[in-house]
Amino acid sequence: MRAAAWNNAQWCAAMLRAHRSPTGGTFTDSLWHGETAPPPLYPDTVTLSPGATAAAALAGIDAASTSPSVKDSYAALDLTGQGFSRLFDAQWLLRDPDAPVAPPRTATWFAVRDEAELAAWASAWDSGQGLADLFRPRLLAEPDVAVLAGWSDGRIVAGAVANRSSAVAEVVGISNLFAVDGPPDDAWRGALTAMARLWPGRPVVGYEHGDELTTALAQGFTPVGPLTVWIRW
């Protein structure tokens, strides 16, 4: 669970660097916080220890953040008194590297290599929400991040982001999984197969909730603990 939280915070830091934050924020034993207001959908702070306090989590939030959020990695905080409300609850997930994975049926998977491919991937991921600009070319320079695409019939039909980390444990995180066409379980198979090629022998971590959690569990993930995302509108 701690390895999953650290991995996710490192992905948040990489995303912040892609948006021209010099360092991607600050890590301590108990939390990560960005040095600038985060891009949409990303937290200002991620707790990394069950001992992280509300005061410490909130102290790292940039004053320019208009809707600050905290990823409470252990579902241990109560931020209602500080004007926050629960955005969602979820489960951290872990998948054993030796667990079998079926090959994808409907797409060929590869790691995005250039700005044009990244733009096509982001457009497919966004599906008209107006958030495609989240995924900027600087991400392609991150050595521990891979933007994975499923290709079929001349276009990107599925995708995910994978990020490698060695803090706490050597794991690979999965996030931003999507399927434009085809069943979600096939997108999971494709992403997991691609991740195993890139970084073999590493456990896969992430988090999901709702229907996506059900699909992930069917792909061999095990829930390892709760988390809560808090937001102040």
Image (cartoon, helix red, strand yellow):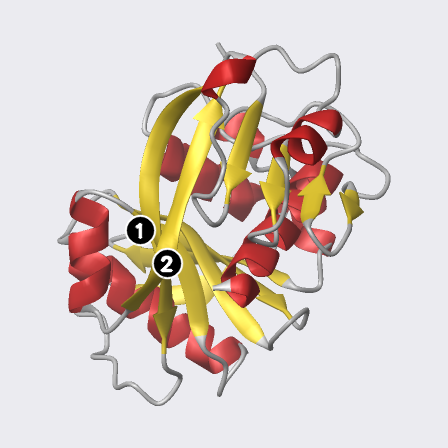
Which label sits on residue 213?
A: none
Is disc 1 placed on a helix, strand or loop?
A: strand
Q: Residues within 10 Å of mark 2 (few under 14, many from 20)?
A: some
Residue 40 spot, x, y in % from top left: 54, 24
- Classify mark 2: helix, strand or loop: strand
Which residue is more in the foreground, 133 or 22?
A: 22
- For the point 41% across and 72% down, the residue is 194
Q: Quadrant of residue 53?
A: top right
What's the residue type where badge 2 is placed? Answer: Gly
Q: Residue at x 73, y 56 (%)?
A: 29
Q: Which residue is mark 2?
A: 225
Left/right of residue 37 with respect to residue 50 in the rendered view: right
Q: Which residue is mark 1?
A: 158
Position above or below: 87 against 15:
above
The alpha-carbon separation of the residues under discs 1 and 2 comes to 28 Å
Q: Work out whether mark 1 precedes mark 2 in sequence or the reverse, and give the earlier one.
A: 1
Question: Would residue 106 be seen by someone viewing this image from the given angle?
Answer: no
| Residue 143 visible here | yes
Q: Is residue 153 left or right of residue 115?
A: left
Q: Amino acid at mark 1?
A: Ala
Judging depth in this view, the residue of 86 and 217 nearest the camera is 86
The residue lying at 47 percent from left, 50 percent from top is: 74
Residue 76's x, y, as percent?
47, 43
